[in-house]
Amino acid sequence: MRPVIDEEMVEAAIQALQNERLVLGESVFKFEEEFARYIGVKHAISTNSGTDALHIALLALGIGPGDEVITTPASFVASANCALHAGARPVFADIDMRTYTLDPSEAEKAVTGRTKAVLPVHLYGHPADMGAIMDLAEEKGLFVIEDACQAHGAIYKGRKAGSIGHVGCFSFYPSKNMTVAGDGGMITTDDEEVAERAASLRNCGRSDWYVFERVGFTARLNTVNAAIGLVQLKRLDKWNEARRRIAELYRRLLSGLEAIVLPPRGDRGVKPVYHLFVIRTEHRDALASWLRSQGIECAIHYRLPIHLQPVYKRLFGFRGGEFPRAEELSRTCLSLPMWPGLTDDQVRYVCETIEEFFDKELWRRWTAERA
């Protein structure tokens, strides 16, 4: 992908540097207001990363030692690390292979007397089954924290990701659908008390400048980053529409290849934003090598599911086989180029190169040379 930093964003950054406080300047609060309005919630609290947004959200909900948080192993490691940072225990449940997101029926099986929250991940920009997850949460008395770090602007049944659960969390890392030209994050909620606690926790636990109500963190978003984020937010819907158009072109050009599985498409109620365009194939590693040899960058999100990361194997004794669907996704997934400025000719070149690889003679020769 290629992050967009244009003249308007540079000018916004310069104006913030010259005219505002460098920390918690006016642009920070404007960005929070505009982001809350965009998502459709009452409150947005910025942080210095998506990871800290998740961590602080859990703490603001009162989740801590002795509690369990159910989440998916098919995600970036922060989706589980946040529970550990809060002193709680992440508990994994397998995914639905139709969406690559948390399977509500598997999540229900994982509920115990210590479960306090469910943390679904809108993986690759595709919303999780929030209807079933919210029903489960209501039945069991659980909080729902949406990990929307890859889903800025994604829609589930008329509501934006990050506005459906008790809390939503976003990342503005440079690879996301919108960025702040560095690390950054946001917490979204309609709960005023949760918002107040989150705002205090991200600012050293302050209730006033020299009064500290809780043990907090230095996790603020820099003013200059917020200024850039304000401009990026104005472009987000246009960029997301471009991603959807590119995804449809990929889908049309690759639909005849039986050797690959295309990503979930969404329907009338679900509108993904294609943070990543992820195909699956049993020949993933060979295909990735071939694409790179032809000048096409590709990536794997993620090569190991969280429970098979070395630190989680050490901490919890996972050996593999516990969550077979998440493991299948990690074994077969491949992210193709995806950013709003991708041209039709570039998409066609990617697809033609994939088709060329799956020509039997070429595939056999290519894999034999690397055996």
Image (spheres, rainbow, N blue to C red):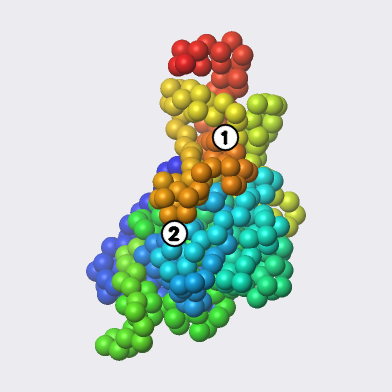
Question: Which secondary structure, mark 2?
Answer: helix
Q: Which residue lies furthest to the front in this view?
A: 317
The kind of residue tagged 2 is Asn
Give the x, y percent position of residue 338.
51, 41
Question: Which residue is more in the foreground, 326 or 65?
Answer: 65
Q: What element carries label 1?
A: helix
Q: Is residue 185 visible?
A: no
Indicate the position of residue 248 as horizontal and vertical percent values.
65, 40
**Which residue is at 71% across, 57% downward?**
105
Residue lying at the far left of the rendered structure: 18
| Most foreground residue, 206 or 336 | 206
Question: Which residue in the structure is indicated by mark 2?
Answer: 81
Above or below, 270 against 200 in this view is above
Residue 209 in the image: above or below residue 95: below
Q: Relative to the observer, which residue lies in front, 167 or 16?
A: 167
In-front residue for pair 36/27: 36
Name the image quarter holding residue 20.
bottom left
Return the residue found at the far right.
Answer: 268
Provide residue 326's location: percent of width, then percent of height: 59, 45
Mark 1 and mark 2 lie on one chain; the one further toward the N terminus is 2
Q: In this view, does 63 lie to the left or right of 28?
A: right
Which residue position holds label 1?
A: 332
Disc 1 marks a residue whose amino acid type is Thr
Distance from Cα at disc 1 to Cα at disc 2: 24 Å
Which circle, 1 or 2, is nearer the viewer? 2
337 sits left or right of 219 in the view: right
Q: Which residue shows up at 27% across the image and 71% down it?
A: 22
User: x and y percent of residue 204 in the render?
Assistant: 32, 77
Q: Is residue 170 left or right of residue 132?
A: left
